[in-house]
Image (spheres, rainbow, N blue to C red):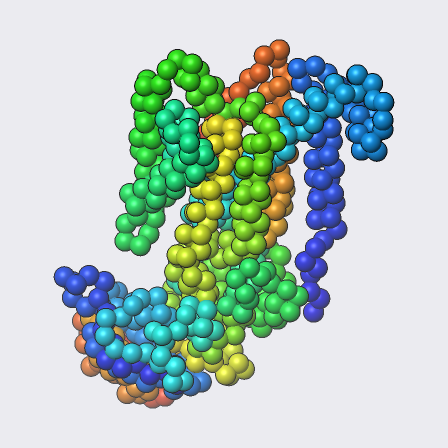
Amino acid sequence: MIKVSQLSFYYNESEAPSINNVSMTITKGTVTTILGPNGSGKTTLLKCLAGFYKTQTGEISIDGRNLTTLSSVQRSRLVSYMPQNHHTVFPYRVIDIVLMGRSCHLSPFAAPRKKDFDLALAALETVGIGKLSQRIYTKLSGGEKQLVLIARSLAQQSPVMLMDEPISHLDYKNQITVLRLIRSILSAHELTIIITLHDPNMAASFSDEIVLFKQGKILKKGKVDETITSELLSQLYDIAVSVTGEGYKLIYCPEV
Amino acid sequence: MHAKKQVTARDVFVWSLMLMLLLVSCLVSLSIGAYHISVKDIFCTLFQSMFGVKDRTAFVTTMETALYEIRVPRIILAIAVGMSLAGSGVSLQALFRNPLIDPFILGVSAGAALGAALSLAFLPHIPVQIVSFVCGLSAVTLVLFLARSRREVPVLSLILAGIVVSSLFSAGVAVIQLMVDPYRLGSIIFWLMGSLTNASWKVIVSVVPLMVFGLVLLHLMRWRLNILSMGEEEARALGVNASSYRTIIIVIVSLLTALSVSACGIIGWVGLMVPHMARLIVGSEHKRLVPFTILSGGIFMLWVDTLARGLTDFEIPVGIITSLCGAPFFMFLLKRSREIWES
């Protein structure tokens, strides 16, 4: 269980806080999606959860352990983070990228051993790209790169996975592939996954819980039925949005 | 599922080839110089002195002096300096996520040079290495301070800051040159051009052990360089405390560069060229790349120094040769870098 209480964070004291007194609880074994307009602080919230920033007030705990008091090694054993717009300078092989996920399990001067290689390969098999292990990462397509990063998070073996817009640069088919994969690893590996998304349709079709996030605050958090409504989405994005359908939701903007 | 072996037959082949190349290079380098010593004489001398043959001829004794007092120390120093510069280059490139960085561009060399010049001209009581290390470290700190904005170190500002700080420190060296007496001026100028003529057992004892220490540390951290090359945030997400690793690596690199500069002046471009050539052979993964680069650096420097001694009757400063091949190499990289690194 992830518990966030009264979390506030600002980059500069002169600016408005990016995260403004946020409290929420996230249940184990669920996918929670953070939806919100650009600049709402989604990514910042995710980065706070990953422990990148020293938050000014508030507390984040995972299974009762306070995240801020942990070292980066201890923290990364609990939480993995998948960045958006991933860019590497050096043309590493896919297997080398996945192996990086093992670093929090290795001592400072150690290099990965056979066991780590096996785990990394198994992670690649899980996401269905075992045959790409020797390919050059920078030459892969966007969809394949995302799968590699998911495999890296799996190899990290941390119970909580954070993903920052994992499908934002993918075509429709790859978006669905990645989201399905996320659901399947969720149940197979007993994970808790928090992701940010832009498309409310995608969020509605695959999340357990949705957090509507605007201007550093939670507008509404709850199940799909409670959050994906015409009123709330219109309020979230400041445009008229319509939601139709029972169970499976179809969200569209009638004014375009 | 079959795990691909970590050490492949190709690795074994490449490594044995390199080690053989190193041995052959040493032999060639032993034989070339102010006067030629044939390979047969080298072995003969080595054999006689190794087994303590009594009644050695005058010829052999002369050989012994030439080999043990001049060429062997020089070869050891060349290899150690080449290894240090190449090892520094490859680490900095990973750390700053930029294949066009080396200790020279980052201002470490200029700082170390100022330190060494200060020590040669005015501070004869303090060892060159120490002054050189302190100045090299302050130069790179200044560069990082100038280039850093909002937790990031953008590549362009890094290179610009490097140029500014380098020229400041070089100006300092020029001022020192104006102030010292002509006798010392000559030695400072020759030393600034980079040369291994000062090689002696005394110099080796004072720099090589520390170089080995620094290189071993870099070698031990080599796998982490992969992670550091992903950027600070990502490294932290993977459980690697990027800022402390960065501090450690910068200190080691400053130490290695300062030791090289204090022993043989400014030898540029090695840290840039060698990692590139090594990448073409073993790939970018640092667990393989770092040891290979270090070894290649040693071989490269040995060859360059042998050329410096053997090309003409007088000795060409090594720094001039590395610049002569390094600058065009950099131009080529700069032109091609878009295709290579942004594909």
- At x 34%, y 73%, the residue is A68
**Residue found at x 65% / y 24%:** B70
Query: Does B137 sit above or below residue B242?
Result: above
- Determine the image quadrant of residue A219: bottom left
Residue A174 visible in the snapshot = no
Instruction: Judge from the rendering whether residue B156 lies leftward or rightward of residue B259; answer left or right.
Output: left
* Quadrant, the N terminus of chain A: bottom left
Outermost residue toward the top?
A: B313
Q: Is residue A71 above or below residue B55?
A: below
- Give the image location of residue B34, x and y in percent: 66, 15
Task: Give whichever of B15, A194 is nearer the camera.
Answer: B15
Residue at 44 percent of width and 85 percent of height: A29
In this rendering, position of residue A34 left or right of residue B83: left
Depth check: give the residue in front, B267 or B162.
B267
| Residue at the (85%, 26%) spot, across then down | B54
Task: Provide residue A215's location: percent of width, then percent of height.
Answer: 20, 71
The image quarter containing residue B146 is top left
Residue A70 seen in render: yes
Q: Nearer the viewer, residue B266 or A123?
A: B266
Name which quarter of the figure residue A127 lies in: bottom right
